[in-house]
Amino acid sequence: MAWFSRLFAKNKARQEVVLSSEQRQLIKAWHDLPAADLDCSHRRTRYVVVDIEASGLDTNKDHLISIGALALVDGMIDFKDAFQVVLRQDQVSSNENILIHGIGGLTQSAGMDPVEALLAFLRYIGKSPLVAYHAFFDQSMIEQAMGDYLGMEFGRTWIDLAWVLPGLFDFQTGARVELDDWLELFGIDNFLRHNAVSDAYATARLLQVVIAAAIHQGADSPGSFLKMEKARRRLYDSL
Amino acid sequence: MNNSATELLVSATIEFLQSYPPFDRMEPDALQFLGENVRLAYYPQGALIVSPETGVVRIFRILQRGKVLVRRAGEGSGNEQSALTLGPGEGFSIGSVAAQRSSTSIYTALEDVFCYELTAETFFLLMHKSSVLNLFCTQYLASLLSQSRQQLQQQFSQHVAEQQTMNSPLSSIIHKDPVSVSPDTPIKVAIELMANRNIGSMIIVDAEQQPVGIFTHSDVLKRVVLPGIPLDNPIQSVMTHYPRSLPFAANAYDAALAMAKHGVRHVLAVDEGGCLKGVVSERDLFTLQRVGLRQIRQTIDSATSIEMLLLASKDVRQLSLNMLAQGVGAEQITQFISALNDTLTRRIIEINLDKHDLYGIEWTWLSFGSEGRDEQTFSTDQDNGIVYICTDIMDREQTQLRLLEFARDVNADLDQCGFPSCTGNIMASNPNLCLTLEEWDEKFAQWVSAPEPQALLNSTIFFDFRPLYGKFNLASRMRLSLLRLTRNNPLFLRMLAGNALCVLPPLGMIRDFVTDADPEHPGTIDLKKYGARLFIDAARVFAMGYDVSATNTVQRIKQSAPLMNISPDEAAAVVDAFNFVQLLRLRHQHAEQTQGRSGDNLVRPDDLNEVDRRILKEAFRQARKLQQRLKLDYKL
């Protein structure tokens, strides 16, 4: 597991994290939250769909710029239960990178203090199951930032729609299917591509489709998604 | 909540909604509120979204993506003509959410569907915020109302078509085998049998199964209990001999006619050999709604006594109630009631003419007020009078006396047949209302030239006169001279207009309605005084100002509108509004009467559903428009 070793490698080089007692308390409070019941039905689960923007695609070198997230409660998306934050950057990302996500240099340096931003994110997600498409990237970036700024092990299990979807829909299996392909298949528009919130919104609608299909196939809980993902990975590895 | 994320999602939602009516015209504040309060839901292809079984619809939905199929409940999926497809930007189901009832249609996802969902509470808040949405929904509901009324009328015409099968043979009406006993059966046994079988009549047959008598429920009291007949006497001592019978092949119409003609409630059906096959009761005919307008008219026309007319007047009421239940519009029902009441009154007049010698007098029976306008509701008292010609060779006092005696009998008979005597004594038997043509003209001229409050009040009753029986040309002459009087008297019309403006539509500044006009009945609106009359009074002024001789409010509006440069659409809206108020009155009176009350006009807006409340509000707005027109025309 490459990212583990990287994490340890980073740990050594990590600067000492200095947090106020209030901030430490917030982290502890989050840790103390009871874990989400993964066997509870979809309808009664609060899913949080996450999308991030980073300075690049290299999980080793690049860093987190923005997080967008939306909750899916009772199978429905409530716009009031949405989250967005831009982390203040000491070093503005490259021009090419800015052109992708559209978060300009000024916005980047005027962002929220990373510690506060990540604490707000923790408060928003609670212990809800996290969902993303190609979750590995989002997961790595957020875990890295959590370690760097909050000095904590984030250690959440993520549901990766990229692995769940092929188990439910017979569509271009084998090849690396991108999020956009699925969105096109289900006719989900993305009003602002590469904006963390807009991408998360599109992914959340994809999750609505996935949940409806999963219920149809008898997979009625977040835990069943994890099982499907595991089975899929095993199948993929054995190929 | 994180504002920037919500703001972004809300603005994307608003942008979407703005491409569709009525959101494209919606106020920015309201649109923002809508965007903030919707939630996005997903329904896979084939999923059921709303149906009558899902109960009261508490969510208003706007399609974001995909198509939704709408079918009327109870129709198979094969019936595609009535099906409707909704696409992005379309909302559903306004009617059910607004009326807080369950849907009459079935909504299913024709494709994968995303839709914005708004709770009913938020929907109502939004209606308050947005006059655009408010108007949209009101218009939508109004169109819905006329649609549903059309449907109901179609259904009703089907019923009427079914009623044409008055030719259907008695064999198809009779469902139960007859219960019969022999002539020497003790009364006690016969009555016990009737009670046990829950039947209204017992047929007495001889050994050959030939009916020889009938004994009914009402006979128990009159022939057994009151005279104190011992219960072990044979039934033949108290039965009606020779009951009316018809061949089994006779039809329902024959049965109805036989009942009306002989004033009986039961007719026996017998086979060729004269053996009893069954009993047809009056109730069989009416509960099956097999008696329509034509049949009742025939019953009335063939009636020879007040007792028979009394039965017919009950049928009139029953049939109009059925029509109401079947969703027939107020205009048709009120005209229907008026038409049958006219027939009834004419028959009463005819019956009384046999007893009174009016030979040589030219006279006309007039009706005033609501009857004169063809707008009678279920609760109607008498408003009538007589106009006659007194030639030089006739003694005026003698002539009037003869007419008055005749009128007294007619008034009394009308009272018996369900038209209570007028408390204000507006009746033909009142010497002040049994007048010669010249006297009426003079009376009218007095009111027009000196329009004091009482004269104005009289005008609102008597100027809506209509001839009912006799020489109709007398009434035409009255109308002509009245129009001549008013046409040349702008002052009178102005006073009449002012009088019409005394009562304002009960629209509240803050609340929807003003419901405290009557301190004795708080929370209610008198839909006669503060509803129908607003339209009636305005239409009267229009008609008189523009030489329209019609007395019916709808006709007055329709005929004077083109002369006043009111567009047909505007006139139709006023007519709809008036008819709706009348419909609410009829419904209310019906409900009151089924609970045994006299049937007032005090409607409680809080008891109306949201749809009716909104339409009523719109109706009052139309009344206000009429009043504004009066103010403008007469500079009041």
Image: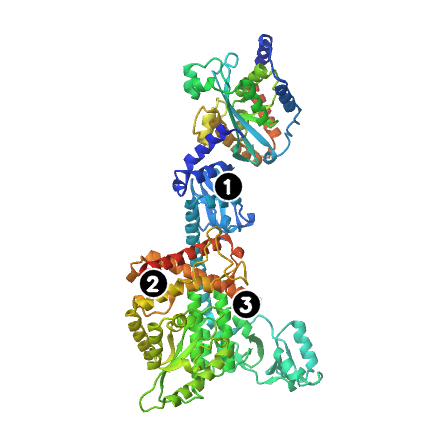
- Mark yes or no: residue B105 visible: no
| Residue B193: x %, y % from top left | 67, 75
Q: Tell me which chain the residue with mark 2 is part of.
A: B
Residue at the top extreme of this rendering? A13
Q: Which badge, 2 or 3, comes first in the chain's sequence?
A: 2
Query: Which residue is denoted by mark 1 in the rendering?
Result: B118
User: Does residue B363 lie above or below A190 as drawn?
Assistant: below
Q: Tell me which chain the residue with mark 1 is part of.
A: B
Give amino acid for label 1: Leu
Element at badge 2? helix
Residues indicated by labels 1 and 2 sit on the same polypeptide chain: yes
In the image, B448 versus B507, the foreground residue is B448
Specify few, some or many for label 1: CA neighbours under 10 Å numbering under 14, 14-19, or 20 or more.
many
Q: Where on the picture, by quarter, is residue B459? A: bottom left
Q: Quadrant of the N terminus of chain B?
A: top right
Q: Give the alpha-carbon distance from disc 3 to disc 1, as whole Å.
A: 40 Å
Q: Which badge, 1 or 2, comes first in the chain's sequence?
A: 1
Query: Which residue is denoted by mark 2 in the rendering?
Result: B558
In the image, B251 versus A183, the foreground residue is A183
| Residue B547: x %, y % from top left | 29, 68
Give amino acid for label 3: Gln
Query: Which residue is denoted by mark 3 in the rendering?
Result: B593
Element at badge 1? strand
Q: Nearer the viewer, mark 1 or mark 2?
A: 2
